[in-house]
Image: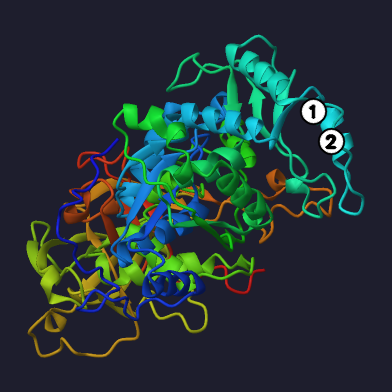
Amino acid sequence: MSAPSDPTAAPTAPPDASADGAPAAGKQDFIRQIVRDDLASGKHAAIRTRFPPEPNGYLHIGHAKAICLDFGIAREFGGTCNLRLDDTNPAKEDPEYVQAIQDDVRWLGFDWHDLRHASDYFEVLYLAAEKLIRQGDAFVCDLSADEVRAYRGTLTEPGRNSPYRERGVDENLDLFRRMRAGEFPDGARTLRAKIDMASGNINLRDPALYRIKHVEHQNTGNDWPIYPMYDYAHSLSDAVEGITHSLCTLEFEDHRPLYDWCVARVDLAGSPELVKPLTDRGLPFEASRPRQIEFSRLNFNYLVMSKRKLMALVQDGLVDGWDDPRMPTLQGIRRRGYTPSALRLMVDRVGISKQNSLLDISILEGALRDDLDGAAPRRMAVIDPVKLVLTNLPESHEEQLVFANHPKDESFGERRVPFSRTLWIEREDFEEVPPKGFKRLTVGGDVRLRGAGIVRCDAVVKDADGRVVELHGTLDPDSRAGMEGANRKVKGTIHWVSAAHAVEAEVRLYDRLFSVADPDDDSDGKTYRDHLNPDSRRTVNGYVEPAAATAAPEQSFQFERLGYFVADRRDHTAARPVFNRSVTLRDTWAGKA
């Protein structure tokens, strides 16, 4: 657990505050307005939020919205945000996921006030359950899972009381303590809340609070053969931590009455004996009556977000692991070249609402383009090379040309790019028989070599199969920088790299993983697997200028005229460069759907 902040330290005004510390106008949405009103009314002196993922998988793009909201609101209003791992289902949880979650939160630019676990509160939750039994608010039920479902009723029919609902307090306490002692097998009994089996909200029809599960826990070992259910553990964990605003997605809206019921019936603030296990261990405790507020999930087309489906893609070898750059996991899109600032920009553009909707993935891709347009240095690379020999230059010709690292920002400085007699250019920049409107290199035609001058193509060399393998051209000496003909107008400009100095690189051309907007749509009898895009990854060998080869892993560039690329965080080295395409310069999918 990270050290708590010093309570004696002088508070500083948050970014979303005026000079006198009062909440000021900033980002506008209904959640932030609730927070502003609560601060202005004196309901809360400080804001406390939490981000509570279950460590049963890798975080994905949808979690980015929750992270930015939970941590962002705490930061904006001078409050705190805990990272709490909801580790109440040890059969599906793994320390690998725990570490990845922490890495992802920090990568997005946030840090937590305290690192907590639901398991930190297992003793508190158990004592709270005994209190509910003594109050007549909970009972031990012997119905099987199938029987519980049969008794629950439907959306139009009320449920029926369990035959064990009227057990006495002493019998319930005895059975619950024997559950705790591990006397009963998995599924034999549950502890259920006693609320209302006729409630219109099925979540209030005597929901389970504890189940028997003889599974070793990564933090508590074999100490606990019973584990609390999510709704119960989550609400009381919020109360234990003094959370003021418990932000969650819309599917939990129907769970809010149960959340409030648990908090109110247990009343941690009025029951100091329940939290003695915490205070005895020196853990901070600040009871509260947290307010749950729901917001819409982040859903994009051309993706699947289901952990089950993502797991299947990995396990069946349809992708190259959880950090495959085509995956929507934060580990995957980070490797793809997405930046924390691009994700935060996307979250700001999407906004916060109470209306679920399926967003076009071009919003995500557009945020990355806009972010990298200002942040990524420019480099030259050729990914489908054909050789161009400037026959009027001597074979030994070599010079260093000066290029700006960014055309819109002088602070990026300049670099020297080697230029020689033999160059690599893109194969698509030459057409022997040009189509109408073609403005690049043709036999007998002129084109500008980026920063080097104007070249005319004089001849074509082909192999035995008729494929062009080499072009011969003449560089106009009067078109070089500083010469009289430097501004001579030609229709096109192409990029290049010096063949003598270029570094061979592996270039992975990533695209959308699915070829249809709604891969989950099975109305035609197909599954998401049938919609995998066969062109979602192509690997080619190209050439990059030396200044690109020496990039650090995860450094992004705009490869001029090609798109935005990132040095792969796992495989890239200066001796063997590997670049992933993050996004094309323009939306190539527009109009395809």
Q: Which residue is mark 1?
A: 145
- Residue 310 appears in the figure: no
Identify the image quadrant of residue 193. top right
Q: Residues within 10 Å of mark 1 (few under 14, many from 20)?
A: few
Give the residue type that dot 2 points to.
Answer: Arg
Residue sitting nearer the eye, 472 or 434: 434
**Residue drawn at x 68%, y 37% as measured from the top left:** 137
Give the residue type that dot 1 points to.
Answer: Ala
Q: Which residue is mark 2?
A: 149
Image location of residue 404, percent across then percent down: 15, 72
**Residue drawn at x 65%, y 21% as measured from the top left:** 173
Residues tagged 2 and 1 counted as in contact (Cβ below 8 A): yes
Q: Secondary structure at mark 2?
A: helix
Classify residue 160 as left or right of residue 554.
Answer: right
Q: Residues within 10 Å of mark 2 (few under 14, many from 20)?
A: few
Image location of residue 531, percent across then percent down: 69, 50
Image location of residue 308, percent across then percent down: 63, 38
User: Residue extending furthest top?
Assistant: 183
Q: Quadrant of the C terminus?
A: bottom right
170, above or below 346, in the image: above
Residue sitting nearer the eye, 535 or 38: 38
Image location of residue 51, percent across then percent down: 44, 49
Identify the image quadrant of residue 230. top right
Measure the alpha-carbon separation of dots 2 and 1. Answer: 6 Å
Classify residue 365 as left or right of residue 173.
Answer: left
